[in-house]
Image: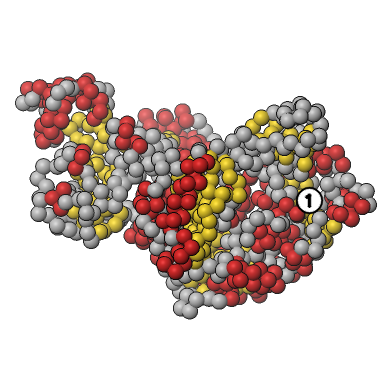
Amino acid sequence: MQYDIPWEDLSPIAHLVAEPGGGYDAIGETPGTNPESQGPWIEVLVDSPASETSLAEEPLKLFTYRVPPELTVQPGDILSVPFGSQQLGAIAIRFTDQLAADLPVHKVKEIEDVVVSGFFARNYWQLLERVADYYYTPLVRVIRAAMPPGLFARSQHRIRLTAQVPPGGKEFLKTIAAQKILELLQSSGTGDYTLQYIRSKVKPGANSGLRELKKRGWVESYYEAGSRPAPKLQQAVTLIASSFPPDLSKRQREVLQVLKRRGGELWMAELLKICQTSSGVVKKLVEKGCVDIYDREALRSPGQPTQTPDTPKILNSYQQQALDGINQIDGYARVLLHGVTGSGKTEVYLQAIAPILAQGKSAIVLVPEIGLTPQLCDRFQARFGDKVVVYHSALSQGERYDTWRQMLTDTPQIVIGTRSAIFAPLPNLGLIILDEEYDDSYKQDQPAPTYHARTVAQWRAELSNCPLILGSATPSLETWVEIAVNPTEGDRTHYLRLPERIESRPMPPVEVVDMRQELRKGNRSLFSESLQQELSTLRETGRQGILFIHRRGHSTFVSCRSCGYVMECPHCDVSLSYHQFQEGGTEFLRCHYCSYTTHPPERCPECDSPYFRRFGSGTQRVMQELAREFPELRVIRFDSDTTRTKDAHRILLSQFASGEADILLGTQMLTKGLDLPQVTLVGVVAADGLLNLADFRASERAFQMLTQVAGRAGRGDEPGRAILQTYSPEHPVIQAVRNQEYNSFIEQELEQREALSYPPYGRLILLRISGRDDWTVEDTAVDLAQVLGGPDAYLTRGYELLGPAPAPILRVADRFRWQILLKFPPNIRVELPMLEELRSRCPRDISLAIDVDPLNLN
């Protein structure tokens, strides 16, 4: 029997797989299995058609197979394996030394064949296993997170005729079922049908009939992904004539000459554009036997504007020292590139990558926000052209699928993307860069695995034996302590500084405005007098500014001025935010947790009062106030509400960069990575919303965000200025930002962390228990706390147990939430009780999520 699974299908991923060591006898056994067969055994992920609907609800599992002596199998190979009465595709995951207790040796089947060797690098699977182990997540869920949508589509098991069927072949068949199947396939226009359809039409005996046809070699099985993105086909033209006939027109001869100069093959659209001709000219050449036109697959990629080629810049002394330090690294190392905002870290990245590409290797560049990828990609593409590929969740399913396939090739390339790009399957990785490594966006809160891209990047660099560069003006406390202050003995770390801006440009001075004094002076505006003065001069001076507010929407909440009633989400324990996109436009209330939306009532639902007041400010309200006080200013709003559509980030930033607006108004997306040389003013409308939050990381986050946004000013030839408005000017974070004192702020923050054994002087694991019944959730949380050890957990298991306790926001999307926090020393592996035991304690309608190294305790 011939088994056909094209490598480009990339779909041998299971929807029906077992826990490690799982059995498969319930689906049927393959005749001829040797009961005495022994290892080596390997666990595989099976691509099951799963024709029974109920199987879709089964948990993902791995299956164990025996490797026959005549086959060489390695993790990452694509295999053909017996599964019940079928032969299915599978991916080899890992070897195992012993079978599960409930899997007898005589039940273990042999791998039939290796379809593709080395489809994934061995260290790629080692990385996924490490992620699964560290984050207490089943391996199959890690595989899901690592690979793009579309690779997990259900396969269709199909049967097709081969060229070996003789005329009148039906007469040679022994069984009626085989004859019916042959007739059915021959009546098909394509000569193939799904196995499910054949079984529905040929009853009984379809299986025996297929066996007879396969034995004769008249039919073969193959698997086709049911809903993966279809290949994108484009017409291509190829030159097939070695000499040109004499009766060619001038235009036809020109087409042939262009084809010859370009290697004999071009896309039809590209050829027509170059020659400025029509497809009719090319079709005439087909008739004369000079060229051939055929459909060829074109890998999808997000459309990128053509960039003017760029050349390496002359580095200042600090940049050159940093680059020299990076270039001298041989093999794995962690590098902290600590550079002030505007110090030229990106140019160092570019020049560090160039020799990596020259060696035939590839690089991964991670950014925290999708909004940063257009600007960064433009710079990289200007320097490296088509060697740059982009990978993030805003791409279409087809673009992600094709980009992922492109990354599998040996071609040296640069992958730029958000956190999921750390799993890019590059076979020859030479460098990893995390820009703005401090950012919380690198951490996945849900679903599992709750990985941090910085942690995974370190493991990947180790396995690939390549450097990892962590760049930031405000490094995370964990990175600062591990690399700059107290590197672990034997750990290869390098601390490199860029203390000055390029061309010795000054850092923008930060003016702190006490909004209490503004109120005393009678200023009721959202903008202080100082900020008003700067805004009023922007248009006439031709300069641009950035305004930062930490919330989107119009107002934080709506409250009744008569009885104090606050409009809350009916599904979450939070207030509804007021939205109004423009003055006089539609008003609505929205929950920023579950997206529930409603119109604001005309009267208070509690006391029937008509007096509602909006409290707090968001981007929409700031925009309305700007229009009212500064009607001459052109404003672009840049937040998650205005960047939902594809390419919105690029479009808005391009409009601002081209001078179509005077003000870029937005939320935290403005604070990181944007390089806009024409910006001379940064205004922080309300810094207080970042302070005094119920989170031990609140001060660190506030300092990083305010420092970063202030650093967007003065990156060009004109000096910059930052104005920070607050009601708490004496707050330590505000003072540290004003004085630009990173080190002193870090020292104070680390003292508090060390006293409380919080990261980086301790580690955390957060267990989240949620469900629709509040009492059941609470009871389950109490039960799990008892399993985890209660007050004596530190002595018996090495961790301190805090809780159980309600989550700070108890109810989200009609699900009640409780938490258990485990605190333990750094650099140790905490052995939790068996996850199966913890999950078995949870009732069917209760969800248990384990967040390792959580950044969000809400």
Can residue 246 be seen in the rendering of this structure? no
Residue at disc 1, secondary structure: loop
- Most foreground residue, 612 or 391: 612
Crowd rating for badge 1 (residues with CA inside 10 Å; few <14, some 14–19, many 20+): many
Residue 595 at what x, y percent from top left?
61, 36
Q: Is residue 667 left or right of residue 30?
A: right
Taking depth in this image into account, of 10 and 137 the one nearest to the observer is 137
**Residue 203 placement: quadrant:** top left
Q: Tell me where residue 819 appears, x and y as whole percent.
A: 52, 52
- The colour scheme is secondary structure
Instruction: Check disc 1 and report the residue beneath it.
Output: 685
Q: Amino acid at mark 1?
A: Val
**449 or 547: nearer the viewer:** 449
User: Image point 76% across, 44% down: which residue?
Assistant: 617
Residue 713 visible? The answer is yes
- Specify whether 690 is left or right of 543: left
Q: Residue at x 74, y 49 (%)?
A: 549
Q: Is residue 198 left or right of residue 819?
A: left
Q: Position of residue 30 (x, y in %)?
A: 14, 42
- At x 71%, y 57%, the residue is 692
Q: Residue at position x 50%, y 46% from top?
A: 778
Q: Residue furthest right?
A: 521
Residue found at the far bottom of this picture: 489
Q: Quadrant of residue 481?
A: bottom right
